[in-house]
Image: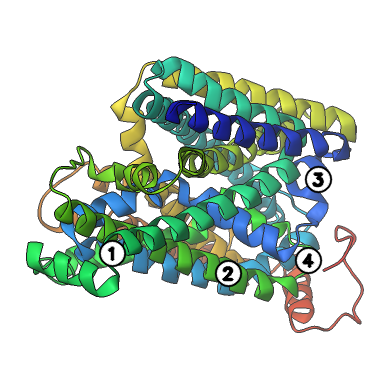
């Protein structure tokens, strides 16, 4: 049996597992709340790993190891920023968003929450937020499909379009059928695969390279600056830009929707500990993979690594039995597919819950809403696949600042909505649009101050305008104040108060 046959067998097992999870949850979706938010029933471990897996994508297994392999630990600042940002997101946003979205009309999407929280009777903020999500995430999904096609082309010599359609087809099937629960539980399995692979590869590599001491001495001899986070003349602006990636977490709809789906607010703490443990060990494994790989190829000059971003894949092929190496390959696919499924579902929710329902103003049953959501998943998938049909650098380039776009557009808005009573509709809308526009302008200018990561000016502009306009336009609203106070009481553990009419289930 050839090595490639073992690899294919591992991928078949992986694909079959994902489809089985989708089929299992197919019949458990009887309402839009079930399909889009899993009935707010995610256990802590599933919520934690689902958020992590849908966040990291192929960057964790290929981008980060490749950057550190090529340039050293100076590229590790982004990992520091993301780790701090993820912790702050779990700490500051998760508990409040879980309670507030249920108290405020039992909202199941970010746009519907903002509309209810601000009592926007014009529906402008919900439509604007839904449109931003629909447009940007359609490009995001397309970029994920491109990554899948490139993966199969580079790993198996398969035609790009065939590989793209295979990844898209499997991901769409389990997402379309099983909805949020299928996406979350497949994310959980995929997160475990990524975690185990990121531990196994560097550990085996350490043995192959002679142990930690030998690895470090080999790296120092080859490049004395490789183990320094301040070497290579890195400036303060570059460090600030890398750390600023953490600001993006507060505004990523496909991540924070996991907070809304927790079973109870009390489980947010357990989820945070599990999620941060997963992230720290996984990021540490990615960094260790880069350093071990650097030492291993220095010690074996007969081996060549054409692309630094493939160091994780190549080490997996060299160090493990072909079947295990096949599951290492599957871990990369897991990183890609977990992100695509989460983004696909959030995009469908924006189309159905935040745009279609408002535009057509018609009453639908729970089963009709689920059917509409499945049709939306299919429609968005077809559009994204069409965009990805020809490999396009423009799409992949957009993803580089889409994180900043979402972070700057939604991050300050979410934080203010959760922590500040006086946020107004005009303030939220002005800040949200200004943040997104600033990212678009700043990200397309180079040199001087414009080398600063565009999320920084976008986030700050949103924050300043949202506060300023809100102070000028805020009017007291009794229901808004009552909901804010109710949320604070529930967060303090006081369950003696009555639930608002929109809230149901456990908080």
Instruction: Indicate left or right for 359 with 128 as reference.
Output: right
Instruction: Indicate left or right for 205 with 148 as reference.
Output: left
Rounded to the nearest angstrom, the CA distance separating label 4 from label 1 is 46 Å
Dot 1 corresponds to which residue?
Answer: 76
Dot 4 corresponds to which residue?
Answer: 479
- Mark toward the viewer: 2 or 3: 2
The mark that comes first in sequence, 4 or 2, is 2
Q: Quadrant of the C terminus?
A: bottom right
Dot 2 corresponds to which residue?
Answer: 90
The mark that comes first in sequence, 3 or 1, is 3
- Mark toward the viewer: 2 or 1: 1
- Mark toward the viewer: 3 or 1: 1
Rounded to the nearest angstrom, the CA distance separating label 3 from label 1 is 39 Å
The mark that comes first in sequence, 4 or 1, is 1
- Where's residue 379, x and y in %? 62, 21
Dot 3 corresponds to which residue?
Answer: 33
Q: Residues within 10 Å of mark 4 (few under 14, many from 20)?
A: few
Instruction: Indicate left or right for 323 with 233 as reference.
Output: right
Q: How crowded is mark 2: few (under 14 residues within 10 Å), some or many (20 or more)?
A: many
- Where's residue 278, x and y in %? 54, 65
- Residue closer to the observer: 497 or 154: 154
**Tags 4 and 2 in contact by the CB under 8 Å rule?**
no
Find numbered disc 4 in the image and state the secondary structure of the residue it sits on.
helix
Up/down of 209 relative to 338, above or below: below
Residue at 40%, 63% in the rendered image: 203
- Mark toward the viewer: 4 or 1: 1
């Amino acid at each position: 049996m050839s090595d490639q046959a073992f690899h294919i067998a591992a991928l078949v097992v992986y694909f079959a597992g994902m489809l089985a999870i989708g089929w299992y949850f197919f019949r458990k979706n009887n309402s839009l709340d079930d399909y889009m938010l899993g009935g707010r029933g995610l256990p802590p471990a599933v919520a934690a790993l689902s958020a992590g897996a849908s966040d990291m994508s192929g960057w964790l297994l290929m981008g980060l190891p490749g950057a550190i392999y090529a340039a050293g630990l100076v590229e590790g600042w982004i990992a520091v920023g993301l780790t701090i940002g993820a912790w702050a997101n779990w700490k500051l946003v998760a508990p409040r968003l879980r309670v507030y979205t249920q108290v405020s009309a039992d909202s199941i999407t970010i746009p519907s929450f903002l509309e209810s929280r601000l009592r926007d009777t014009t529906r402008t903020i919900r439509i604007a937020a839904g449109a931003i999500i629909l447009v940007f995430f359609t490009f995001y999904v397309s970029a994920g499909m491109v990554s899948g096609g490139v993966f199969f082309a580079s790993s198996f010599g398969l035609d790009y379009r065939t590989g793209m359609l295979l990844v898209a087809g499997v991901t769409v099937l389990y997402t379309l059928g099983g909805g949020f629960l299928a996406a979350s539980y497949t994310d959980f399995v995929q997160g475990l695969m990524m975690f185990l692979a990121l531990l196994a590869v560097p550990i085996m590599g350490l043995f192959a390279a002679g142990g930690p001491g030998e690895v470090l001495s080999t790296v120092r001899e080859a490049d004395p600056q490789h183990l320094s986070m301040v070497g290579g003349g890195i400036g303060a602006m570059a460090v600030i830009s890398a750390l600023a990636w953490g600001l993006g977490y507060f505004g990523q709809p496909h991540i924070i929707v996991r907070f809304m789906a927790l079973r109870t607010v009390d489980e947010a703490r357990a989820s945070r500990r599990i999620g941060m443990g997963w992230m720290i060990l996984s990021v540490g494994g990615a960094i260790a993979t880069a350093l071990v790989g650097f030492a291993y190829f220095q010690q074996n000059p007969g081996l060549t690594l054409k692309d630094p971003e493939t160091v994780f894949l190549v080490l997996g092929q060299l160090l493990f039995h072909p079947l295990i190496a096949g599951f290492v390959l599957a871990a990369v696919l897991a990183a890609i597919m977990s992100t695509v499924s989460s983004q696909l579902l959030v995009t469908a929710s924006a189309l159905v819950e935040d745009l279609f329902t408002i535009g057509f103003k018609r009453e639908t049953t729970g089963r009709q809403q689920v059917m509409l959501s499945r049709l939306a998943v299919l429609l968005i998938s077809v559009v994204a696949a069409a965009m990805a049909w020809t490999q396009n650098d423009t799409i992949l380039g957009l993803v580089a600042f889409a994180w900043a776009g979402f972070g700057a557009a939604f991050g300050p808005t979410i934080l203010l909505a959760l922590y500040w009573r006086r946020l107004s509709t005009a303030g939220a809308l002005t800040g949200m649009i200004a943040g997104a526009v600033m990212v678009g302008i700043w990200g397309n200018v180079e040199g001087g101050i414009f080398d600063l990561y565009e999320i920084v000016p976008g986030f700050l502009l949103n924050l300043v305008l949202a506060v300023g306009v809100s102070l000028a336009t805020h009017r007291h609203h009794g229901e808004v104040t009552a909901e804010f106070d109710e949320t604070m009481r529930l967060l303090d553990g006081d369950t003696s108060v009555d639930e608002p009419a929109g809230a149901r289930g456990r908080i």
